[in-house]
Image (tube, rainbow, N blue to C red):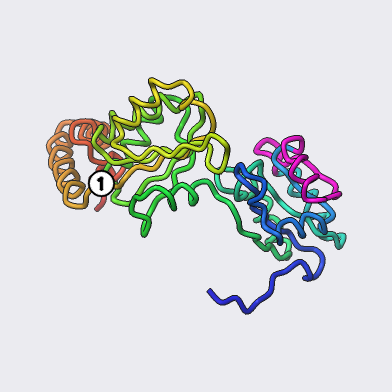
Amino acid sequence: MSAERDNGVKGGRGRLWVIATPIGNLEDLSPRARDTLRRVDLIAAEDTRHSAPLLAQAGSRARTLALHEHNEREQAARIVEHLRGGGDAALISDAGTPLISDPGFRLVRAAREAGFEVSPIPGPCAAIAALSAAGLPSDRFVFEGFLPAKAAARRERLQALVAETRTLIFYESSHRIVDSLADAVGVFGGARDAVLARELTKLFETVIAAPLADIATRVGADANQQRGEFVLLVAGAAGEAADAELAEGRRVFALLREELPPARAAKLAAAITGAPRKLLYEDGIAP
């Protein structure tokens, strides 16, 4: 990518800066991010109390406001009005790159639709940091964010990904990591290669690379490994195996379709063969 254009903080007013912040180690805040946080008039943070120590260390005296999933529409309108008045603003999340499993999409879209420039200041992202240290294929990958909280929905989502050949990346919380690992083993199989990255860049950083079943067993037996913030990476399905699984799913779907509605036939065929339910259904109803 060309580096000719200088999107430094010397640009004109009325700009929204999307700034990546550290995921643990405060020293990972880039000099340009630090300088921009000092210069902007307004900073939108997911949790202003959480961000206060970082902003204090950066030397920022900007006015802050909370922007989260419950108030983003209203706050986006306020920030756009601030930009219209000639001020500039920054968007940060609690940790990492904004909008990546965090609020900010509506604000960025509103700013762009109102004609204002939106400039990123790149930096830490837990998903990319974990991928870089995982030792799994990184040329093609799928970021899935957080899995559903409810068990049935979580298993259904995993099931839809069972034939995915790209490396899968998930975020998970401490109170669901054990159940999510158990579900991953049940859907992908215990032999599937995986990596669990915990507390990246922090004091108790742990990266476990092993088959899924081994990771699930280790985490289940160690309460310390159940604490913190997690990135789970799962190797994609082998191409030939995925193709064979889908072919078998289509065969079973065709048989069931003779007696059942398409949605029911796809659900059963997926449960029997492990093929993606959504793909079976879409193929089955295609003209």
Q: How many marks?
A: 1
Image location of residue 36, percent across then percent down: 76, 59
Residue 110 vertical placement versus 148 (above, below)? below
Q: Secondary structure at mark 1?
A: loop
Q: Is residue 136 above or below residue 122?
A: above
Amino acid bearing label 1: Ala
Nearer-the-camera pick, 79 or 287 = 79
Which residues are drawn in magenta?
48-72
Q: Residue at x 33, y 25 (%)?
A: 217
Would residue 133 appear left or right of 27 to someone viewing this image?
left
* Residue sitting farthest toward the front: 203
Image x and y of residue 103, in percent = 63, 44
Badge 1, how many Cα within 10 Å: few under 14, some, many 20+? many
Is 58 covered by the magenta stretch?
yes
> Picture coordinates of residue 126 (x, y %)?
52, 46
Q: Position of residue 232 (x, y in %)?
A: 42, 39
Please give left or right for residue 173 compared with residue 15 in the image: left
**Closer to us: 87 or 5:** 5
The residue sitting at 37% across, 40% down in the picture is: 195
Mark 1 sits on what residue? 237
Membership of 142 in magenta stretch: no
Residue 7 in the image: above or below residue 200: below
> Residue 275 vs residue 160: left or right?
left
- Left or right: residue 260 versus residue 85 is left
Question: Toward the viewer: 198 or 252?
Answer: 198
Q: Quadrant of residue 249?
A: top left
